[in-house]
Image (spheres, coloured by chain):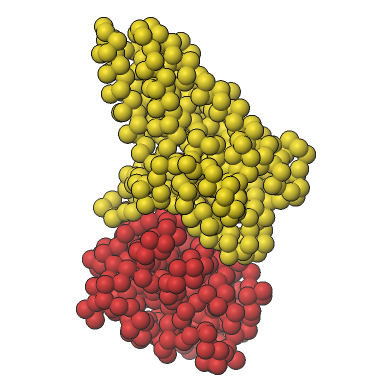
Chain colours: A red, B yellow
Amino acid sequence: MRTIRWDRGTITTIDQTLLPVECKSIECKNVNTLCEAIVSLRIRGAPALGAAGGYGVALAAHTGTAGTLSEFMRDIEIESDRIRRTRPTAINLTWGVDRVIVAVRRASSIDEAKRIALSEATAIADEDVERNTQLSRHGAALLDDGDTVLTHCNAGRLACVDVGTALGVIRAAVEEGKVLSVVSCETRPLNQGSRLTVWELMQDTIPVTLIPDSAAGTMMRKGLIDKVIVGADRITKDAVFNKIGTYTHSVLAKEHKVPFYVAAPISTFDSTRLERDVTIEERDPDELRRINDVMLAPADAAVYNPAFDATPVENVTAVITEDGVVYPAESESWNDLFF
Amino acid sequence: MRTIRWDRGTITTIDQTLLPVECKSIECKNVNTLCEAIVSLRIRGAPALGAAGGYGVALAAHTGTAGTLSEFMRDIEIESDRIRRTRPTAINLTWGVDRVIVAVRRASSIDEAKRIALSEATAIADEDVERNTQLSRHGAALLDDGDTVLTHCNAGRLACVDVGTALGVIRAAVEEGKVLSVVSCETRPLNQGSRLTVWELMQDTIPVTLIPDSAAGTMMRKGLIDKVIVGADRITKDAVFNKIGTYTHSVLAKEHKVPFYVAAPISTFDSTRLERDVTIEERDPDELRRINDVMLAPADAAVYNPAFDATPVENVTAVITEDGVVYPAESESWNDLFF
């Protein structure tokens, strides 16, 4: 089942905040509901957000009520901007929104605009599945039979339309007959590792062990981790932006000579910015202060809660894309991706 | 108020599992209650466990019912062994138990045994306060006005009888007039950082910011951390055993040339073992799977949940003790501590 899909004016997506207890879908019939779902991380994961952005514009078009094409387009632009602003660091969201907007601008009638919006959004979702399938095959070649692979956050099926990026690579290697086991960092403060990655891999009966984020170091020191593989929310020429904690894993991997791989489609690459130009989203302090009604810290504790960190590409062994594996250390092929 | 104290046959201690919501004491009138309190981490922290071990033997003596001295001593030895086994990695617990046991063996009557047990246990607690006060003064000289100091877990007043080790050093520096701010890692899975360290420092109005463990790397990379200071549960000639995540911080500190300090009394040093001889306690998988009734992972998820990790002394800039500051890199003075 796809993580996000469109059916007659409704975007249906798995509510990831309910996992691992419940695998339940939510329906978004208007942009408000969709924006709430993105802000609350019911839908999350860079590639899934690309599809959510695309379908979001299709939903804005579908629910548009303006009488003239120019008013209709103006309304869509306003709604699109609201969608973009829900998660400022995730480039795929903006990328998905923009791709559909650009396509829609070709329309010469409101009906044509609606048709184009949906068809472009559907193309994004279909291409995501296709791209992740290719990416996963390329990446699988980097994993060896018997490897224990550490991953952080959730770069799985739930983060994409289907297949997954980092977990897609692991799945493809398992499908090739390699025996792998996965170590999933819980990924504080929202526990996407324990809630989503562990759940996904258990569904696929791929062996997975949950650890606190802070245990990655001692496991690498003991030689218990053969490879690290993570997804990415944005890749600039100089840095990989991904869930907070990724940078720490990259330093540990360098220290212990463990290969550090990033799996991400080309849509994650940002040629227009460098690390210094990217704003890192800071999230609600309460994510660290409490879990539901359980207080983990004093209610008025000062908190620093960045959603992402930046890993300099020097710490990255290779980036796995749908077009193949690229090594940042080989600066020519790396630079070719940014122009 | 001392974290642990003795009053007429009752050990009274703050129930640290209730913090930060409630600062409430529990009373242990027998060894069973004390063992439960240690296993459940109502009492925790290396130096506090030393006192708990000592008072535990005093409690075993106080509640002993045997009619002859040899039976009385046999019962105390059995009870002491139960206390020792509650937390196998924490050397201070065993150290506190053993110190009182050895003293009690001098007794020539049951009454004298009871008196000696209590007086030796009281001496351990009093010395802990005195030692931490000295240690804190030595360590304060290492901190500079304006420093931001990262700490992990809770090596504070709550981990000791009073004052604290790592937090004692910070307090002493603040008392000297230095302006410091503290970054407290939440310290998964039991959140001693968010629950205890943040609470303690807020009580003292020392500025403190809570972060997820995984954000230490990006903060050091941005130059936001000037020093790291942690406590220790056991120090062998080759490694510092402390809360899981300490090793990761040490690698990050080395990468970013941030001084990495360990504050621990001499009672933490173990001359009889090397890293390879120390068993690291693995704790209940449910600590990672759930918080109270909130499921963070599938109920049957496989978990690796070590309580501690080992940091090789090469990664440690200095160890702060009550006798002064020792630099492992200066192998002669370091080796003098182990004989």
Could you tell me which residue is drawn at 48 percent across and 36 percent down? B46
Q: Residue at x 67, y 55 (%)?
A: B226
Nearest the eye: B67 or B45: B67
Instruction: Compare residues B61 and A228 and report the one nearer the observer.
Output: B61
| Res. B145 visible in picture | yes
Up the image or down, A4 lies above or below B16; here it is below
Q: Nearer the viewer, residue A310 or B63?
A: B63
Identify the image quadrant of the C terminus of chain A. Answer: bottom right
Q: Which residue is located at x 44 percent, y 14 percent?
A: B116
Q: Quadrant of residue A144?
A: bottom left
**Where does the image place residue A59, in percent across and percent down from the top left?**
47, 75
Q: Is residue A264 left or right of residue B179?
A: left
Task: Report x, y in % for residue A34.
Answer: 48, 66
In percent of the image, x 36 and y 15: which residue is there?
A: B61
**Quadrant, the N terminus of chain A:** bottom left
In the rendered view, does A41 fall on the left or right side of A173?
right
Q: Look at the picture and state if B87 lies above or below B189.
A: above
Q: Is residue A111 visible?
A: no
Q: Is residue B313 above or below residue A110?
A: above
- The answer to whether residue B263 is left or right of residue B148 is left
Residue A153 location (% of width, % of height)? 43, 64
Across the whole image, how many numbered discs are drawn on residues? 0
| Above/below status of B291 relative to A95 | above
